[in-house]
Each structure stands twice: as structure tokens, then as C-alpha cells.
Image (cartoon, rainbow, N blue to C red):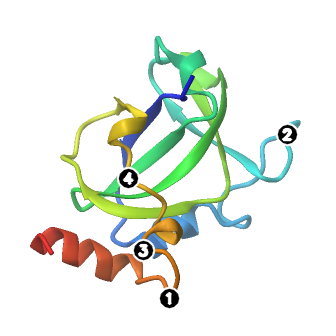
Amino acid sequence: MTPLNMTKVAYGATSLEEIHGWFAPDARPPLPGHGKEVVQITTRNKPKRAEEMIGGSVFWILKHQLVARSEIIGFAEAENGRTAILIARQLVDVQPRPRRAHQGWRYLEAADAPPDLHGVGGTGDVMPAHLAAELARLGL
């Protein structure tokens, strides 16, 4: 069975580079007991379909585009009754795809998820994400 994904707005980010900076080792400490390559984000409510999401990804929305993803490792309890979403520190750029901003998170089926940027177009150099996003915005 293909894992279920989620979308989440990269609130406050002004660029893809800034989102990458969020996951740098000096910006976000590793989680005790989970290794240095796992970090957490929190949400108010645990998804009802959380078990289906392990192995899926959080797809980040920036300027109304899906631009990157982080693999979902698991879920845990966080402070103040919140839920921790355990994600891989590694951020993977994806082919930009239009997506409206929203509050919280939303489910994203695998069929609707954009492909990783490094896998687009076969061989050759990879177009920088900001240029790919601009071309997608223009419909090209």
C-alpha cells in the first residue's frame, strides 16, 4: 500500500533556501532517542490516518506551490497535548506544483504528489527550484 502524504504551509518562509535552513543541524536539534537525522514539527491534532502516513511525506507549500518534502518517520506526543510529527531532516526538492495555502495540514494522495526534482527530465543539470517555480507559475 502506498503511504499517504500531507501538505503544510511553510509559514514565514520567503524562499526554498530558508526552508532548507530550518532543517540544518544547527537550526533544529535532533530528537533524543531518534538519531540526528530525525526532527519534529508539531500540530494540534493527530491525523486520524496517521498510521497510513508513516513512510509518506510532508509536502511544504511556499508561495502557493508545493516545493519540497520531508519523509514522515512517525508520530509522538508533544507538550500541551499537541502531536509531534517526526520527520527526516533531509529535505527533498520537488517539481513545483500549484497548491492553495491553508491552515494546519491536509492529506495528499500519492497520485497527486509532485515528483522529486532530481528525478524530473532524465539526465542533465537540474533547474534551480526558484526557476522551476517561476515557470510553473507562468504555466510553462
Q: Which residue is mark 1?
A: 125
Q: Secondary structure at mark 3?
A: loop
Name above or below for residue 137 compared with residue 116.
below
For discs 2 and 3, the disc positioned in front in the rendered view: 3
Give x and y (percent) for residue 72: 61, 37
Look at label 4 and name its amino acid: Pro
Q: Label 3 near label 2: C-beta < 8 Å?
A: no
Spatial CA distance of label 1 from label 4 is 19 Å
Instruction: Name the residue at the bottom extreme.
Output: 125
Look at label 3 and name its amino acid: Gly
Spatial CA distance of label 3 from label 1 is 9 Å
First in residue order: circle 3 vs circle 4: 4
Q: Which mark is residue 114?
A: 4
Which residue is rendered at x = 35% and y = 59% of the image? Answer: 12
Q: Which residue is mark 2?
A: 32
Q: Secondary structure at mark 2?
A: loop
Instruction: Name the residue at the front extreme.
Output: 122
Give x and y (percent) for residue 91: 58, 60
For discs 4 and 2, the disc positioned in front in the rendered view: 4
Spatial CA distance of label 2 from label 1 is 38 Å
Look at label 1 and name its amino acid: Asp
Which residue is rendered at x = 83% and y = 53% of the image? Answer: 36
Which residue is rendered at x = 35% and y = 52% of the image? Answer: 11
- Callout 2 environment at 10 Å: few (<14), some (14 to 19), or many (20+)? few
Q: Which residue is mark 3?
A: 121
Q: Which mark is residue 23?
A: none
